[in-house]
Amino acid sequence: MKIAIVGAGAMGSRFGYMLHKAGNDVVLVDGWPQHVENINQQGLIVDDNGVETVAKIPAMFPEDCHEVPELIILFTKSMGLKKMLQDIQPMLGQNTKVLCLLNGLGHSETLKEYVPAENILMGVTLWTAGLQGPGHVVLSGDGNIEIQNVDPKSQAAAKEVCDVLTQAGLKAQYSENVIFSIWRKACVNGTLNSSCAILDCNIKEFGELSEAGSLIRKIIQEFAAISKTDGVILDVEEVAQGIEAIYDPDQAGAHYPSMHQDLVQNHRLTEIDYINGYVARKGQELGIATPYNQLLTTLVHAKEELLIK
Ligand SMILES: NC(=O)C1=CN([C@@H]2O[C@H](COP(=O)(O)OP(=O)(O)OC[C@H]3O[C@@H](n4cnc5c(N)ncnc54)[C@H](OP(=O)(O)O)[C@@H]3O)[C@@H](O)[C@H]2O)C=CC1
Ligand SMILES: CC(C)(CO)C(=O)C(=O)O
């Protein structure tokens, strides 16, 4: 399949590499000059669970990419999604499917402004990745993907995309209720990403804290109160136990969540306003108390102020 990975940072590089290795025609589209230059000059360097390989995948800036792929996989950061969708308009053919796998809440509304509903596929992933530097991605652990079409007419297309991803080892499943999955994944990020970024630890270290169990349940309760107003019923205990299962280093335990990578490792702005900040904002609008999410949002913004000069 002809696939453009749009936003080819850590996760985009993982997906691009695995899809390229499986024989798909992949291009990496990104706005970071040093990253694009390194990939084109030396190839994408991949540390694949301790084994280093080099993948020769073309990389381009959004404004230079005019070919129309069959599938676009979006992996920008939440803050960059709108601008990227504006920049890639020439790549959107009549039948180009656009799959959004970003963490966070509210993205399908943004996509609908730029992509016809019948071409939008929404999803979530538990794969992880990190960048060692521009053009150098580090892969570890296991993962999976859930995908669903926004328009009921496009179910066959969503299932075809699941097959292509699964053939590349990315373990994609068709979801009958992706909005539920997006909320459930937002709970993973709302507990682990902000906490690990504030505490400067990885997922396993966080899970070993004596207060971890009680803290994640308090945060999830607030997510559940807001998701209910969106028609999504979350079982707090089920979600909490799902999060506790990924403390295992064979799952995501050794991983520093993407918010830790952004803030602590790279001194970059975070996606907090699309995760805990989204819940805190909706809580304020709807008159629902969300003190834990409000505090986490405030602390992450405070740490942004301290670390980003
Ligand atoms: N990393 C992970 O393990 C996981 C991440 N996710 C989600 O996937 C999405 C993409 O995340 P992720 O791949 O981690 O994002 P990255 O930060 O690795 O890449 C996103 C974009 O940020 C820019 N960028 C990244 N690092 C630098 C840098 N040092 N200097 C300049 N620009 C940089 C690049 O584009 P540009 O310059 O154009 O902004 C890049 O495309 C997010 O929504 C994230 O929450 C989901 C599951 C796991
Ligand atoms: C791996 C995981 C689930 C950690 O919260 C993630 O989505 C991230 O790093 O952003």
Image: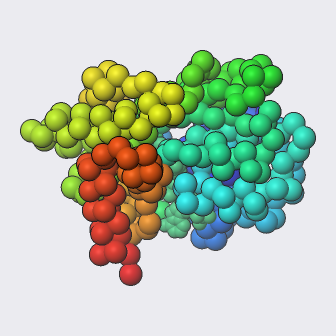
Give percent across and percent down for residue 215: 20, 40
Identity of the residue drawn at 48% across and 27% down: 232
Q: Is residue 149 visible?
A: yes
| Residue, far bottom | 309
Answer with left or right where residue 129 lies relative to residue 65: left
The one nearer the camera, 176 or 140, is 176
Q: Is residue 10 visible?
A: no
Q: Is residue 167 above or below residue 107?
A: above
Give percent across and percent down for residue 218: 23, 38
Give percent across and percent down for residue 150: 70, 31
Identity of the residue drawn at 48% across and 63% down: 133
Quadrant the C terminus occupies: bottom left
| Residue, far left | 210
Identity of the residue drawn at 90% across and 41% down: 94
Q: Is residue 217 above or below residue 85?
A: above
- Residue 158, image quadrant: top right
Give percent across and percent down for residue 44: 60, 53
The one nearer the camera, 111 or 52, is 111
| Residue, far front | 287
Answer with left or right where residue 162 lies relative to residue 289: right
- Residue 34, image quadrant: bottom right
Identity of the residue drawn at 51% across and 28% down: 231
